[in-house]
């Protein structure tokens, strides 16, 4: 064997040793394109600020901003401004998030309202049991107390 054929073998062994060393000392290994918890929290905080900045914008079915929104249009717009792409509808957004229990919710998590297995509304958790959302025709983007116990939470990674 020549030195060139040994290089990949040495690198793969060195890589495995590095990974094991990092794991043994409690490090975090991210796959390409993965987001750390800190990055996700920063992104969520920015999305929350963007949503709050849209207070008073009118609801319009199918609108994704920057001046009018439906519920999922507001969350899509807010996270896009924070650097994360979300699918278009509330149901699709629910399917794309990491589902978390209410006891682990944080500011910037998405709050999903559902009925009979279908997600029909979404807002961004603002803390203290409130969400920023674009509720319905004739209403404006606003901060409002969560009115239902039957909600689900999702974290955008």
Image (tube, rainbow, N blue to C red):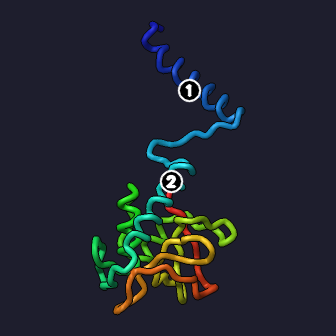
Residue drawn at 48 percent across, 70 percent down? 95
Seen as rendered, the residue at the extreme right is 24
Residue pointed to by mark 1: 15
**Residue 31's x, y, as percent?**
50, 43
Residue drawn at 53 percent across, 84 percent down? 114
**Residue 81's x, y, as percent?**
36, 60
Secondary structure found at label 1? helix
Q: CA distance from mark 2 to mark 1?
A: 30 Å
**Residue 92's x, y, as percent?**
42, 72
Q: Is residue 133 above or below residue 29?
A: below
Residue drawn at 28 percent across, 71 percent down? 66
Q: Is residue 110 left or right of residue 25?
A: left
Q: Is residue 141 above or below residue 38?
A: below
* Marking on residue 139: none
The mark nearer the N terminus, 2 or 1, is 1
Total count of labels: 2
Q: Is residue 10 above or below residue 75?
A: above
Q: Depth check: 99 or 20 in front?
A: 99
Residue pointed to by mark 2: 42
Secondary structure found at label 2? helix
């Amino acid at each position: 064997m020549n030195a060139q054929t040994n290089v990949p073998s040495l690198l793969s062994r060195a890589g495995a040793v590095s990974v094991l060393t990092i794991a043994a000392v409690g490090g975090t290994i991210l796959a390409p394109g993965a987001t750390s918890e800190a990055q996700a929290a920063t992104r969520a905080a920015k999305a929350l600020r963007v949503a709050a900045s849209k207070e008073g914008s009118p609801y319009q079915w199918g609108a994704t901003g920057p001046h009018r929104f439906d519920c999922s249009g507001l969350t899509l717009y807010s996270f896009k401004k924070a650097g994360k792409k979300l699918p278009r509808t509330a149901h699709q957004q629910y399917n794309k998030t990491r589902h978390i229990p209410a006891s682990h919710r944080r500011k910037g998590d998405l709050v999903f309202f559902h009925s009979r297995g279908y997600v029909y509304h979404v807002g961004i958790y603002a803390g203290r049991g409130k969400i920023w959302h674009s509720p319905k025709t004739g209403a404006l983007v606003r901060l409002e107390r969560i009115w239902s116990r039957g909600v689900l939470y999702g974290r955008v990674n």
